[in-house]
Image: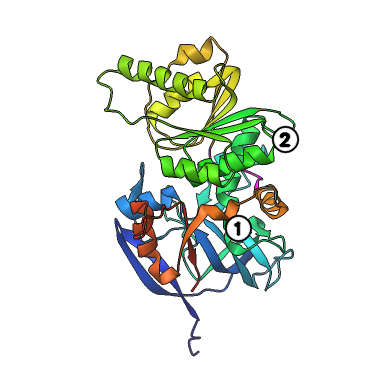
Amino acid sequence: MSPIALPTQHAAVLHGAKDLHFEERTLWPPHQGQAQVAVMATGLCGSDLHYYAHGRNGDFVVQAPLVLGHEAAGIVTAVGPGVKHLVPGQRVAIEAGIMCNNCSYCAKGRYNLCKNMRFCSSAKTFPHADGTLQERMNHPAHVLHPLPDNLTFEQAALAEPLSVLIHASRRADFTPASNSTVLVFGVGAIGLLACALAKSYGATRVVAIDINQSRLDFALRNGFAQQVYCLPVSDRAKTTEEQLRRAKENISAALAEFNMPDGFDLVFECTGAEPCIQMSIHAAVTGGKVMLVGMGSRNVTLPLSAAATREVDILGSFRYAHTYPTALALLASGKLPNIEKIITHRFSLKDTARAFELLARGRDDEGRMVLKVMVGSQ
């Protein structure tokens, strides 16, 4: 029997810290329940950057060559046996988490906490599941979501980070009926999406805090936040007591500037930085909520009594579950004005290493700030 020559495709493959190869790989046909997708756009995320820069993301170490990328959309090119709801030529968003649909968390609809979750581009499980920084990928059809006709592939790629905020909002019981005031710490891509979502939900005030004035200017200029405050940068506090005192003083000054001395109904903490997490507790109104979205500091000293005695709920949030259809509909609705301005730079797949280097620098050669970097198929 003569061997059949299988087609090939290209992928950006991470072999270790800052060791990214543009490789040719065999393209296998999709299995039962899978569809093959030509990936058209992938947004780069902070976790991807950690893997690229350090060969690890927290405890998760790259143990074998890994394709990064998990914010993506593309076109179905083939479907495997048993796939009924997708056809070749259909445009889809790729939900990167493959849940087991078999555990107690999946049964409860909280599949983001699935014990057997395989998340494409994460080194948490071994063998690793490859991500979307490749020309084509086979993926379970049940986590491919058809795109509204008026959505671009790049906008659809934003459904992944937007899903993080939709899930966080559900955890905080924040809805369009809430009539809430909202404060966002950190106006990178995730913080800007938090602002945009809050505005689309009709929040009565949406304000933002950061240490980067140009990011705050961007948020204000493009209507993401109604008011912003730039935190003063100071030397590290010598003691824990000093750090906690400073956090309280800094947030008091910010709340005075916002003319909201009692604080905000909901605080989205999108930095993961210890001082901001400390400030967020004081920034919440009595009976309010702090939503921890940012990843960063592992062990944090908190003014817990200030939360407990004022009944400030501190909530954690991890990825998302059952959010993609909502995210795609919201992106297509026009209720997130200027959302595509979050995408500041674009690269082709073969230039993925350059894309990561730019994301790490934070500014391009012309001095323009970097928010969301998109990698295309060409």
Residue at 33% across / 53% down in the picture?
361
Please say which color scheme the image uses: rainbow
Q: Are marks 1 and 2 in contact (CB under 8 Å)?
A: no
Q: Foreground residue, 85 or 6?
A: 85
Q: Is residue 242 magenta?
A: no
Q: Considering the numbered disc 1 on the image, is that residue within a helix, a strand or a loop? A: helix
Question: How would you classify the magenta stretch by its main secondary structure?
Answer: loop
**On residue 155, which mark appears?**
1
Report which quarter residue 274 is drawn in. top left
Q: Foreground residue, 285 or 294?
A: 285
For residue 338, above or below residue 206: below
**On residue 360, which mark appears?**
none
Q: Which residues are magenta?
A: 318-323
Position of residue 145 measured from the top left corner of the image (x, y, whole percent): 67, 58
- Badge 2 local density, few (<14 within 10 Å), some, or many (20+)? some
What residue is pinned by disc 2?
176
> How many labels, in total?
2
Position of residue 30 measured from the top left corner of the image (x, y, whole percent): 59, 70
Report if residue 96 is visible in the image: no
For residue 46, above or below residue 83: above
Position of residue 204 measured from the top left corner of the image (x, y, whole percent): 67, 30
User: As shown in the figure, which amino acid type bears the numbered disc 2?
Assistant: Pro
User: As shown in the figure, which amino acid type bears the numbered disc 1?
Assistant: Gln
Q: Foreground residue, 216 or 62?
A: 216
